[in-house]
Every structure is written in structure tokens, then in C-alpha cells.
């Protein structure tokens, strides 16, 4: 087992009607004046009313901001900070999925240091050194942001989508009622399953793999989310499936499935540029880019891809290369046939010209400022080749 440090301070409150405990959870975390962030669905569904009632019962003062969109936007976060800085807020509550939660994280950082433009953290000009406490009421099983040290933000002005990792991103608590996810549209549910899979797979395909328990946990999580992903796509109201997928989502991105090995996250890097340029749902960007990435790099670790095929998909092929390719095909078929998500550019954004592909590749390297990936580190020319593989 390789060395690692693991610390996840987020308190999990899981089960039916747990959103009614929100006010007390904020009190327990030391919050008194709350700025809550949500999307439109939390208001329409009546969820916010139940949360507001719990905050009122706990004697909290609060103000709400709505309007978060998929691929969380810098402008909303910065406008919120500019409006509410200096008004004594000591807690930020995110009610929604990954976009809402990541917006709440950005706002919490901004309110702690309102003199620093939020994008400075995401562009690398500044490091997060302070943040307000924050909590989450989760409504979408997908991003895993409710227990992670990660957050992303999209800058509408330049089309860039960037992420940061910092302990200041980790929420004080995460309230998870799986029943809240039953009303999600099928496409959103499917994108969530894909994101959960990829958070695990972007850790699993690593340069260091001498971690038997970590591998076993990752493989079990993948088998579980694949199985219950099938169930929930057929029956959106299956509470068992919803609960299993929600818990998979949290564990997929709180570090557990990658302990002792570096994260690769090439697929996320490639997909973020698609989302930033075309406003494509995050899950779809991942199902488009993973098959192309996998076919480009699998020869670097055919045994790893073969193990993935055998332990996750039940592939019996003994030859490692054939097993690896069969695993890639099985994953691609699941994305396409079960989740009904695109696996190439054509059905999502249309076939692109060479100039666009080269621009995507350049953006993915932060204009030459980084190499992408760990299993097969890449600069812009190889990233361009992967975009070419997906461009059909």
C-alpha cells in the first residue's frame, strides 16, 4: 500500500426527510447568519420552503440567491459576493447539485476575502487562505462536491472552465435525501451516473496501482453504480437505486477510491474544455471523451484496463490487450445504450473543424502552462489527437 494522507471532515446526514434537519445542522456548525444558494428547481419543488422553515425554527437569519445554471458561472458567484460582502454572513448553504455546491464554495471564498476577485483563485493567481463555513443539501447524485475538496467554475467571458482543490472547499455537513433525486429528468440522472463513474475511473487508471483495498473499493463502487444506473434509467422512482447511486456519488469524489495513487483526471480536463466552449453538460463531455482517451492510452497499461474489464464488466478474455479493448467497448456501450448519452462529437455538438480541435487542446493545457494526465502525460499535440478520435 502506498503512502497517503486522508481527511474528510464532512458530516453526512443521510435518509428520508433529512432536509428538515438543515437549521440544526447549521447551528451545530456555528452558523448564525446564512446566505443560501440554489437553482430554480429547489424553489419550484417546495424543498426550499422546508429548509427555510428549519432555519427559522433554529433561530437563524438568512438571505437566498437563486439562478444557478449547469456549468457554474463566475458572474453569478462574483455578483453575489459584491452584493453581500460586509453584511455579516458567517455561513453559506448550497441547495442543489454540483453546480450549486461549487457556486456556494466560490461565494464562501469570496465573502471571506472580498478584495480578491474570485477568478484569481481559479486562474492560479491567488491561493484560497480563508473561507466561510459551508453546508450542502444535495438534490442531484453526480458531482460528489458535497464531500470533496474540489470545485469548478466557468468564466463566461473567456469560455474557460477551471477547478481548484483546497481543504477550504470541504463542507461542514452534507444532507442527503435520495428521494429528492426521483424527479430528475432522465438525461440529468444519466449524466450523474457518468460523472460518478468517471470520478472513480480517473483515479483508478493511475501510474501507481499497488493498493489492493483501494482498487477493490473502486471496483465495487463501479459495479454498484453501473447496476443501479440500469435500474434507475428504467424506473426513476426506485428509492433503493436512488440511495445507492447517491452514496456512490459521495464516495467517488471524497478521495476514498484513489487512496495511495495520484489522480489522472485527463478525461475531466478534456471534457471541461467542451463544457466551457459549448456549454455542454458535464456528464456528456465525459462520455464523449473517455472512449477516445482510453483507446489512445490503453497500451500504456493494458493490464490495468484488462483488470477493469474483468472485475467491473465480467469480461473473461485472458489476453490482456483483447480484454482491455473489450472493457473500453463495454463502457462505451453502457454510456450509449443504457445512459443514452453521446460518445462522440456528432450527436452532441456536431463534427468540428481542425482549428477548433487545436484550440480545445491548447485550452486544456492552460495555454501551455501544464501537462494533462498521470498515466500518459500529454501536451497539446497529443490532446489534439484525442479530440480527433472523438470527432465523429
Image: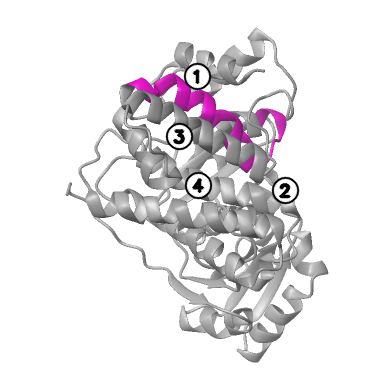
The disc, 3 or 4, on the residue closer to the chain's N-terminal end is 4
User: What's the magenta region?
Assistant: 276-299
> Are the residues flagged by discs 4 and 2 in contact, CB closer than 8 Å?
no
Label 1 residue SS: loop
Answer whether residue 376 is visible to the viewer in this image.
Answer: no
Q: Residue at x 52, y 76 (%)?
A: 14
The disc, 4 or 2, on the residue closer to the chain's N-terminal end is 2
Q: Is residue 238 above or below residue 169?
A: below
Residue that numbered label 2 is attached to = 187
Q: Is residue 282 magenta?
A: yes
Residue that numbered label 3 is attached to = 327
Neighbor class of circle 2 (other Cα within 10 Å; few <14, some 14-19, many 20+) is some
The disc, 1 or 2, on the residue closer to the chain's N-terminal end is 2
Q: Which is nearer the eye, 70 or 286?
A: 286
Residue that numbered label 1 is attached to = 367
In which quadrant will I find the C terminus? top right
Amino acid at each position: 500500500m502506498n503512502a497517503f494522507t486522508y481527511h474528510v471532515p464532512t458530516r453526512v446526514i443521510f435518509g428520508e426527510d433529512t432536509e428538515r434537519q438543515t437549521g440544526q445542522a447549521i447551528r451545530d456548525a456555528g452558523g448564525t447568519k446564512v446566505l443560501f444558494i440554489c437553482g430554480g428547481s429547489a424553489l419550484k419543488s417546495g424543498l426550499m420552503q422546508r429548509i427555510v422553515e428549519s432555519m427559522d425554527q433554529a433561530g437563524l437569519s438568512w438571505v437566498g440567491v437563486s439562478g444557478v445554471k449547469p456549468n457554474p458561472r463566475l458572474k453569478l458567484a462574483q455578483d453575489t459576493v459584491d452584493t453581500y460582502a460586509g453584511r455579516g454572513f458567517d455561513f453559506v448553504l448550497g441547495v442543489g447539485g454540483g453546480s450549486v455546491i461549487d457556486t456556494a464554495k466560490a461565494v464562501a471564498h469570496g465573502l471571506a476575502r472580498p478584495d480578491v476577485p474570485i477568478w484569481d483563485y481559479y486562474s492560479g493567481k491567488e491561493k484560497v487562505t480563508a473561507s466561510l463555513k459551508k453546508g450542502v443539501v444535495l438534490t442531484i447524485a453526480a458531482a460528489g462536491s458535497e464531500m470533496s475538496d474540489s470545485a469548478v467554475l466557468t468564466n463566461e467571458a473567456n469560455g474557460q472552465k477551471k477547478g481548484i482543490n483546497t481543504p477550504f472547499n470541504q463542507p461542514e455537513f452534507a444532507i442527503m435525501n435520495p428521494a429528492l433525486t426521483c424527479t430528475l429528468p432522465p438525461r440529468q440522472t444519466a449524466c450523474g451516473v457518468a460523472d460518478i463513474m468517471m470520478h472513480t475511473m480517473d483515479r483508478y487508471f493511475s501510474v501507481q496501482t499497488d493498493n489492493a483495498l483501494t482498487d477493490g473499493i473502486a471496483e465495487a463502487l463501479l459495479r454498484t453504480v453501473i447496476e443501479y444506473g440500469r435500474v434507475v434509467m428504467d424506473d426513476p422512482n426506485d428509492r433503493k437505486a436512488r440511495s445507492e447511486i447517491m452514496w456512490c456519488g459521495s464516495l467517488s469524489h471524497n478521495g476514498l477510491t484513489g487512496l495511495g495513487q495520484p489522480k489522472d483526471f485527463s478525461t475531466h480536463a478534456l471534457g471541461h474544455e467542451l463544457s466551457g466552449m459549448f456549454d455542454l453538460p458535464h456528464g456528456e463531455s465525459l462520455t464523449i471523451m473517455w472512449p477516445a482517451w482510453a483507446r489512445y492510452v490503453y497500451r500504456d497499461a493494458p493490464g490495468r484496463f484488462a483488470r477493469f474489464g474483468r472485475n467491473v464488466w465480467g469480461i473473461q478474455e485472458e489476453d490482456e490487450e483483447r480484454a482491455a479493448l473489450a472493457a473500453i467497448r463495454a463502457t462505451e456501450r453502457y454510456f450509449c445504450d443504457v445512459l443514452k448519452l453521446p460518445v462522440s462529437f456528432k450527436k452532441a455538438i456536431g463534427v468540428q473543424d481542425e482549428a477548433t480541435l487545436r484550440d480545445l487542446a491548447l485550452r486544456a493545457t492552460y495555454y501551455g502552462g501544464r501537462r494533462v494526465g498521470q498515466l500518459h502525460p500529454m501536451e497539446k499535440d497529443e490532446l489534439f489527437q484525442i479530440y480527433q478520435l472523438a470527432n465523429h
